[in-house]
Image (cartoon, rainbow, N blue to C red):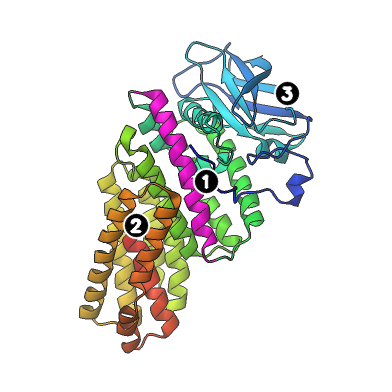
């Protein structure tokens, strides 16, 4: 692995007042932290098991801080003083088949003197913890646990956990997550705009809420629903911070491409496993774009977006995910044609041209190995879609210039999501 650009997700002044340590290497004060959680996934009792708290150093080194015992109800509490040099805290069971969960220093700082509820110590949390340590021990100092949670959906975790070579899967996921984070940040920075500090605060809030939801979840379906809520809260938080939907769609496409490319050698294609992030960002882009197009009734698009997000969260295969996006595309293109009164032949010709550009984009993305290459390919695709010829088709039909540009942007984002 190689060092990547610095994190976009930095804490605001209120969190810095805790003198805490973040994933970017800043430090947390040595105040005592109070944590509560449960150990063991559904059907795996962990009563009586020892849970050890380890400080995670910048280089991934673990230092034992203390331990506690899981109660008869499967829950544990622990109070530990986290050293100023720690970048995170790992809670790991002391048993032959040890499991773990990683807690970011940002979360510890946000909790302050209150008890921090952490995600369950289970297989998915263990895999994510191993990925984070792998990134650190390889020399990377940029990977943010909140972003890792965003990229490591429960479905993707399960797929990677099921691989024959655990260490290879962990290392591949770590490399992929580092590239995905760099692609996400690079894409969001293209059009400027957006307040990184506000986005960081929103993402941290979503991360804390996600931990509580996972703690309460008793089934895989409940955990998947908690993840979907986390993704939507993160996307909505970035929108509130000033990042427009088009930026978020670009960032999601770039990040998911990096994760798919990076894990394919060990787990096969993971399109369905990353569909939730793509669905939320794409629908956010469309909802922003149709406002600029004009027209009087976009309710069909709003409804289709809600259906897409729900369907993507439960897609069991790549084919199911792609069908969900194709259905959404039909609804969006139909609404654009109706609201702009664009003739059917012109709409069909536009859609055909955009599809051809997306086919070229897909080939480029599959070959991309860096965040820069991924984002550059996506930007080139968008430029091709927003050509003067395509704009003329819409303006000739009476669509305003801003509306024409927005129409093409919406169609480009949805088309890209279907490939």
Q: Earlier in the sequence, mark 1 or mark 3?
A: 3
Residue 189 forms part of the magenta stretch: yes
Residue 31 forms part of the magenta stretch: no
* Residue 299 pos. (x, y %): 40, 69
Q: Above or below — where is 82 with respect to 374? A: above
Whether residue 153 is visible, yes or no, is: no
Q: Are marks 3 and 2 in contact (CB under 8 Å)?
A: no
Could you say whether the residue bearing mark 2 is in a helix, strand or loop?
helix
* Residue 315 pos. (x, y %): 33, 45
* Residue 419 pos. (x, y %): 29, 55
The quarter of the picture where residue 318 lies is top left
Q: Nearer the viewer, mark 2 or mark 1?
A: 2
Front-lying residue, 407 or 177: 177
Front-lying residue, 8 or 405: 8
Could you say whether the residue bearing mark 3 is in a helix, strand or loop?
strand
Q: Determine which residue is flagged by label 1.
A: 230
Q: Determine which residue is flagged by label 2.
A: 417
Front-lying residue, 159 or 55: 55
Task: Tell me if mark 2 has few (under 14), some (14-19) or many (20+) residues whose alpha carbon lies within 10 angstroms of its own.
Answer: many
- Residue at 29 percent across and 82 percent down: it is 342
Q: Which residues are magenta?
A: 165-191
Task: Tell me if mark 1 has few (under 14), some (14-19) or many (20+) residues whose alpha carbon lies within 10 angstroms of its own.
Answer: many
Position of residue 212 in the picture relative to residue 369 (left or right): right
Position of residue 79 in the picture relative to residue 133 (left or right): right
Q: Determine which residue is flagged by label 3.
A: 80
Q: Earlier in the sequence, mark 3 or mark 2?
A: 3
């Amino acid at each position: 692995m190689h060092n990547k650009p610095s994190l976009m997700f930095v804490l605001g002044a209120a969190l810095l007042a805790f003198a805490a340590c973040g994933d970017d290497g800043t430090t947390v004060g040595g105040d005592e932290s109070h944590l509560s959680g449960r150990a063991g996934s559904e059907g795996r009792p962990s009563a009586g098991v020892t849970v050890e708290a380890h400080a995670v150093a910048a280089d991934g080194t673990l230092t034992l801080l203390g331990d506690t015992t899981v109660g008869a109800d499967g829950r544990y509490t622990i109070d530990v003083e986290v050293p100023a040099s720690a970048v995170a805290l790992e809670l790991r069971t002391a048993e032959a088949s040890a499991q773990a969960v990683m807690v970011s220093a940002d979360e510890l700082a946000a909790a302050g003197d209150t008890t921090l509820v952490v995600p369950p110590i289970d297989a998915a949390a263990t895999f994510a913890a191993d990925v984070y340590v792998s990134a650190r021990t390889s020399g990377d100092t940029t990977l943010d646990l909140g972003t890792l949670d965003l990229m490591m959906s429960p479905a993707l975790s399960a797929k990677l956990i099921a691989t024959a070579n655990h260490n290879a899967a962990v290392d591949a996921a770590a490399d992929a997550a580092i590239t995905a984070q760099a692609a996400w940040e690079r894409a969001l920075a293209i059009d400027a705009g957006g307040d990184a500090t506000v986005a960081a605060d929103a993402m941290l809030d979503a991360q804390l809420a996600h931990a509580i939801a996972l703690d309460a979840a008793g089934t895989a379906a409940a955990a998947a629903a908690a993840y979907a809520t986390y993704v939507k809260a993160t996307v909505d938080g970035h929108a509130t911070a000033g990042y427009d939907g088009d930026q978020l769609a670009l960032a999601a496409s770039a990040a998911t491409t990096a994760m798919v490319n990076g894990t394919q050698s060990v787990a096969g294609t993971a399109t369905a496993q990353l569909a939730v992030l793509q669905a939320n960002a794409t629908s956010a882009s469309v909802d922003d774009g149709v406002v600029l197009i004009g027209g009087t009734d976009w309710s069909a698009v709003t409804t289709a977006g809600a259906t897409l997000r729900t369907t993507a969260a439960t897609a069991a295969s790549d084919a199911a995910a792609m069908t969900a996006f194709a259905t959404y595309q039909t609804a969006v293109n139909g609404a654009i044609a109706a609201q702009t009164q664009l003739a059917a032949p012109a709409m069909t010709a536009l859609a055909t041209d955009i599809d051809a550009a997306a086919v070229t984009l897909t080939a480029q993305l599959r070959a991309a190995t860096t965040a820069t290459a991924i984002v550059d390919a996506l930007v080139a695709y968008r430029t091709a879609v927003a050509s003067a010829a395509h704009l003329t088709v819409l303006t000739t039909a009476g669509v305003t210039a801003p509306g024409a540009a927005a129409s093409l942007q919406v169609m480009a984002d949805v088309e890209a999501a279907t490939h």
